[in-house]
Image (cartoon, coloured by chain):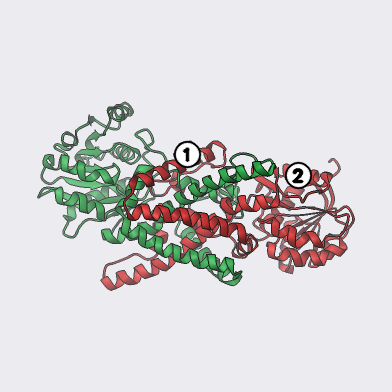
Chain colours: A red, B green
Amino acid sequence: MSKPLFRRVALIGLGLEGSSLALVMRREGLAGHIAGCARTQATLDTAARLGFVDSTHLDPAKAVAGADLVVLCTPVSTFGDLAAKFAPALAPGCIVSDVGSVKLAVIRDVGPLLPEGVHFVPGHPIAGTEKSGPESGFATLFENRYCILTPPPGTDRAAIEKVSELWRRAGSMVETMDARHHDRVLAITSHLPHLIAYTIVGTAADLESQLRRESAENGDVVSTQEVIKYSAGGFRDFTRIAGSDPVMWRDVFLNNREAVLEMLGRFVEDLTGLQRAIRWGEGEALEDWFRRTREIRRGVVEMGQAGRFIATETDDGKTGGGKPGKSG
Amino acid sequence: MSKPLFRRVALIGLGLEGSSLALVMRREGLAGHIAGCARTQATLDTAARLGFVDSTHLDPAKAVAGADLVVLCTPVSTFGDLAAKFAPALAPGCIVSDVGSVKLAVIRDVGPLLPEGVHFVPGHPIAGTEKSGPESGFATLFENRYCILTPPPGTDRAAIEKVSELWRRAGSMVETMDARHHDRVLAITSHLPHLIAYTIVGTAADLESQLRRESAENGDVVSTQEVIKYSAGGFRDFTRIAGSDPVMWRDVFLNNREAVLEMLGRFVEDLTGLQRAIRWGEGEALEDWFRRTREIRRGVVEMGQAGRFIATETDDGKTGGGKPGKSG
């Protein structure tokens, strides 16, 4: 095996992202030693049992000692405190990176704490599942996914290249962009969709209990959990998104507030326009809007970002994937 | 082969739903004769070439002549005119049904036009794909999907049972409910999710072009179609829903206006509450809401409505399906 890309890697946080990254580094032989750090001994024990770390640490400072790469894989609200704890123990020339879904806040919270001679290369792999915890990781999580790096101006080129190589070996397509730009693009492509999904699933749950009460009063028989029962009509896709980690997403919204509120404002403007078109029966306005979005869907499919859909599984009322024969 | 369930079936509309229903009846031997009716000769020629109809008709009246089952499979806005054309030609004892996504409007538009002695059993199979046209049909479309029947009070029991049997043979789970109740439940589980998806995809498209302009001005390099490029972050699921048939969905919103506007009002109330929580940094309120929706997701999974997800294809930023090994 050739010389590993990193001599000693410290992973702070061993959930889905941390454990998956460890499994990638194992498979690719990218790290001479993987030091795992977690908040609880239980997580460390699980990581040791699964064998994707060489040493386990409750103390971030001990985890990063002698590391040439440190990757923060915890909810972004914890980055500041963690960096404050381990920064003094960082070796000169060490690279500090992360997998956080927001980037301006990470640069704001972590950047100032890092000592001279340490390279800061914030990153965001756009990949995940609704699962969490050290047992949820798998080495193919990042394959064919974009990973966005947002190094502050003047960041050491060699450090950026080493982090890029790590993600390329994970099977990701690496892009570099300005942190503010990242936060705005992700606010519309990821953060707002999650906020909307979280909202409607809650709205539906409240309505459902009300519908049941009403129906009971009317004396007509209603099967329980109708909203869930008929979720194939489109709602189901929202429930999947709304099943994401609550703490992680709380942090995303609190740490990308401006961009999320801006995108939310744009969305509500447009929604209100369509609401008015429905109220006043403006069919043409609705149809025009729907035709335009269909074109955008074609763009997604052409760019290979759509994934294959299994008709019998992702279908919903008049929507969804291709035929089973063509997909899955 | 045993005696078919129907002697002669007339399918009005040969798109995804009509062609799929025809293929089911072929496979199950449910119809002695399938008469296909479409607006264009091209569609009729395609249906004849694919062989899922025994006769083709441009005139609905000719199509339904002698039929003991007529199924409307066109956009719901067309039902009234079509029924007016074929009602006089209906044979006594004939059953008229449909596959429309709204039911009160269908009963309002079609019911009064049907002659004495004709049985009206409105239906809604909650199944579909984003494809459309006579070549998009497949016999398994309705398998393991719910089909909701909303027969008006006093409808002939035998007629309801025959339509139920048709859908059971298609592999569907048949439910009967009040039309108004159907329209409210589907407004939240299907219609509102589609409206929201259509909205945000349009919002994102507008933003994307603006971001490109801004970036060009700042002189920083931006790859085109970033919103699509990073759609794996959650946006992708919305684009799939927003790829649905524009005319069909225009009709759904115009014909279920009251229920959709009611659900939209509830949704906006809740969204505004979460917006305020983000603005004022109320992390606990956000986390509580997100935890509740995660429970609902569990309910969907437990009820087997979730489908299996393929991590490398349905993932998005920290969301999505299970591991490839466990799914697909």
The image position of residue B119, as x and y in percent, is 16, 50
Image point 70% across, 46% down: which residue?
A: A177
Q: CA distance from mark 1 to mark 2?
A: 33 Å
Q: Quadrant of residue B63?
A: top left
What residue is drawn where x is 37% and y is 66%?
Answer: A224
Image height check: is B24 above or below A108? above
- Is residue A177 at all visible to an observer of this figure? yes
Residue corresponding to mark 2:
A164
Dot 1: chain letter: A
Q: Residue furthest right?
A: A92
Residue lying at 74% horizontally and 57% vertically, measured from the top left: A107
Disc 2 element: helix
- Please identify the quadrant where the N terminus of chain A is shown: top right
Residue occupied by mark 1: A295
Local packing at callout 2 (Cα closer than 10 Å; few below 14, some 14-19, many 20+) is many
* Vertical order, A26 against B273 (above or below): above
Q: Nearer the viewer, residue A281 or B150?
A: A281
Residue nearer the viewer, B206 or B80: B206
- Looking at the rendered structure, the kind of residue marked 2 is Ser
Crowdedness of circle 1 by 10 Å Cα count: few (<14), some, many (20+)? some
Residue at (52%, 41%) from the top-left corner?
A308
Judging depth in this view, the residue of A68 and B158 nearest the camera is A68
**Pointer 1 and pointer 2: residues touching (CB < 8 Å)?**
no
Q: Is residue B288 left or right of residue B28?
A: right
Q: Quadrant of residue A227?
A: bottom left
Q: Position of residue B102 (x, y in %)?
A: 30, 52
The image shows residue B40 at horizontal and vertical percentages of 28, 30
Determine whether the residue tagged by mark 1 lies in a helix, strand or loop: helix
